[in-house]
Amino acid sequence: MDRDDLLKVRALYDAQMRRDARPDSALARVERVGSVVRQTVPGLLGWNGVLWSELDEGNADAEIAAQIAHFGQHARTGQPAGFEWKLYDYDRPADLADRLRAAGFVPEPPETLLVARTDALAGLPVEPPEGITLRVVADEAGVDLLMEAHARAFGVERPRIREQVLTLLRERPETIEAVVAMAGDTPVSAARMEMVPGSSFAGLWGGGTAPEWRGRGIYRLLVAHRARLAARRGIPYLQVDASADSRPILERLGFQVLGTTVPYVWQV
């Protein structure tokens, strides 16, 4: 895709996945309040945060304060008080990152927003490397394997993701595809794809591989597997928030940059 094509895709992404975002679970509530679109989830494990904003120099600080006040209510009701402002490098005003830091937000490592057409990835090989089989995640036992693979790959436990995947499998199975790469009985890599009904984008998440199994094509295999699933569903684009480690691999596979996103986190 050339620059004009990418700008059109970015505008479509902003419209469908940010401004008109849908809740990521049955308990979540997405609402537009003023110039901000946010998601609020009760309980300990949901994702709370700002998905999209349309701000300027005149209203940015007031809107930031309003979101802090809203999510701060959770602290007074026994819920988590932290939330994330998902900032993109093309969001306005230009100094929004500085304003967030001044309000007490802490930036996490940046990620690159990448996109690829599913038909452009149709030719990627889908044969597992020697010693690897793929297991589709369809139940709690499969989710436990997925989480074990993530722990091996990233070195951390992620209970929020476990709860999210279980909830989607139980309540909205048509919106998720998850798979684990197994070396015998050991899960060594895992990934998932999340889809919004009617959207042009399928999001690729996870994709981590245990250190001793890296460099053997498992990551590429999981991308190819999900690309074919998306193509069968008629979804034209794949989207990834890529880490610095995964970005070069994805770009070699044909993904292109739409922008950079930084999670700005606020805690009491």
Image (cartoon, grey):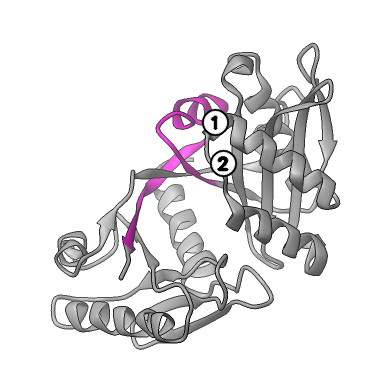
Q: Is residue 251 magenta?
A: yes
Residue furthest top as drawn: 130
Q: Amino acid at mark 1?
A: Gly
What residue appears at the point 76 percent right and 15 percent down from the top-left corner? 129
Q: Is residue 130 magenta?
A: no
Q: Which percent across, then down, holds residue 167?
A: 73, 64
The image shows residue 44, relative to residue 5, as above or below, that is below
Mark 2–mark 1 CB contact (< 8 Å): yes
Secondary structure under tag 2 reads strand
Which of 263 and 227 lies nearest the eye of the viewer? 263
Q: Amino acid at mark 2?
A: Ala
Q: Which percent across, then down, holds residue 39?
A: 49, 75
- Which stretch appears magenta? 240-265
Q: Residue 102 has which mark? A: none
The image shows residue 231, relative to residue 103, as above or below, that is above
Q: Which percent across, then down, holds residue 62?
A: 20, 84
What residue appears at the point 61 percent right and 24 percent down from the top-left corner? 210
Q: Residue 254 has which mark? A: 1
Q: Residue 116 has which mark? A: 2
What residue appears at the point 33 percent right and 61 percent down from the top-left corner? 265
Which of 172 and 17 lies nearest the eye of the viewer? 172
Query: Which of the two discs, 2 and 1, labels the residue nearer the N terminus?
Result: 2
Q: Residues within 10 Å of mark 1 (few under 14, many from 20)?
A: some
Displayed quadrant of residue 32: bottom left
